[in-house]
């Protein structure tokens, strides 16, 4: 017996046109569609459905009941071919749903490498998900959302379409996110507000204390100086060392179209840089 051959349970339905890599396993009652490509050593669990123009990388795990690549939940979608690309070593837990893109968003949803999507998480059409991201149980992403590397999204959180979640940011559970979450921040609430830098995330990512202090100074300018966003970004460039994290924060701020989540101190009467463009 060829040890590299795919192992498909007799009850599974795999379309002859599907492409399965070496060592792929397909569990009981799973369904694999015609245009699906699955990379080496990926495991498809019981009752999973993988459909559409879906390309999956190597060494991924899909647990019971995940539905991957079904058509977008977008009334503007007219049946045109659209794609879902999933990278390597992702863990997709029970009953996760992921949709491909639409013509209005580049016709592609992309998920990077080494991500953990916990049970019942949903990723809608045209999302761009980076690497080493955690989306906890029932975390819900609407369409056209970008999540940068090493972000954490708490359980039962809902993120509005076109919002961006920055690198190494953490969003508390049950949050309502309607504006961009700055990189390296801790956010929580309904709607979500910025509480400060994500100290624990920075520590785990081996970001130095010196760089964390620069980010704290940046957040003070951004949220507590009374400057507009554009002026605050200028001050960050002018007053802080050009370390990568500060530069990325500035670039993120300037690219924001929905505006940034406000600081929690706004609720206490302190005017924030995000209060006006």
Image (tube, rainbow, N blue to C red):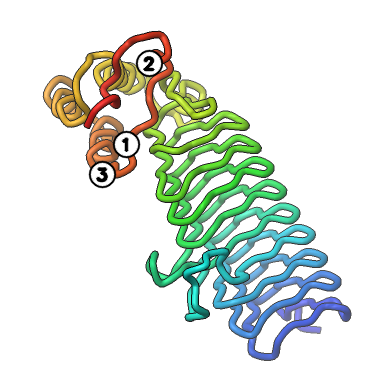
Measured in 3D between alpha carbons, the distance from the residue under mark 1 to the one under mark 2, in whole angstroms, is: 15 Å
| Residue at the spot of label 1 | 259
Q: Is residue 42 left or right of residue 238?
A: right
Q: State if disc 3 and disc 1 touch (CB < 8 Å).
A: no
Give the residue at x 47% y 25%: 186
Q: State if disc 2 and disc 3 touch (CB < 8 Å).
A: no
Q: State if disc 2 and disc 1 touch (CB < 8 Å).
A: no
- Specify few, some or many for label 3: CA neighbours under 10 Å numbering under 14, 14-19, or 20 or more: few
Q: Secondary structure at mark 2?
A: helix
Q: Nearer the viewer, residue 195 or 261?
A: 261
Q: Is residue 26 left or right of residue 34?
A: right
Q: Is residue 92 left or right of residue 255?
A: right
Give the residue at x 60% y 69%: 69
Give the residue at x 44% y 29%: 206
Give the residue at x 45% y 69%: 102
| Residue at the spot of label 2 | 266
């Amino acid at each position: 017996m060829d040890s590299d051959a795919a192992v498909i349970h007799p009850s599974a339905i795999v379309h002859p046109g599907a492409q399965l890599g070496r060592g792929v396993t397909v569990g009981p009652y799973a369904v694999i569609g015609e245009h699906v490509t699955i990379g080496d050593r990926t495991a498809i669990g019981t009752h999973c459905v993988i459909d559409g123009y879906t390309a999956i990388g190597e060494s991924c795990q899909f647990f019971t009941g995940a539905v991957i690549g079904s058509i977008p939940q977008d009334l503007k979608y007219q049946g045109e071919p659209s794609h879902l690309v999933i990278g390597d070593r992702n863990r997709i837990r029970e009953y996760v749903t992921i949709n491909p893109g639409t013509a209005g968003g580049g016709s592609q949803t992309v998920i990077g490498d080494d991500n953990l999507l916990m049970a019942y998480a949903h990723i809608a059409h045209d999302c761009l998900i980076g690497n080493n991201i955690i989306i906890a149980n029932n975390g819900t992403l609407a369409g056209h959302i970008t999540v940068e590397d090493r972000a954490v999204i708490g359980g039962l959180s809902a993120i509005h379409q076109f919002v961006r979640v920055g690198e190494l940011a953490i969003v508390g559970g049950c949050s309502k996110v309607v504006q961009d979450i700055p990189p390296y921040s801790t956010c929580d609430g309904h709607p979500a507000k910025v509480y400060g830098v994500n100290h624990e995330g920075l520590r785990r990512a081996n970001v130095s204390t010196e760089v964390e202090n620069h980010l704290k100074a940046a957040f003070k300018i951004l949220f507590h100086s009374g400057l507009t966003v554009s002026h605050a970004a200028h001050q960050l460039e002018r007053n802080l060392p050009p370390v990568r994290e500060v530069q990325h924060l500035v670039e993120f701020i300037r690219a924001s179209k929905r505006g940034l989540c406000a600081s929690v101190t706004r609720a206490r009467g302190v005017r924030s840089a995000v209060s006006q463009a």
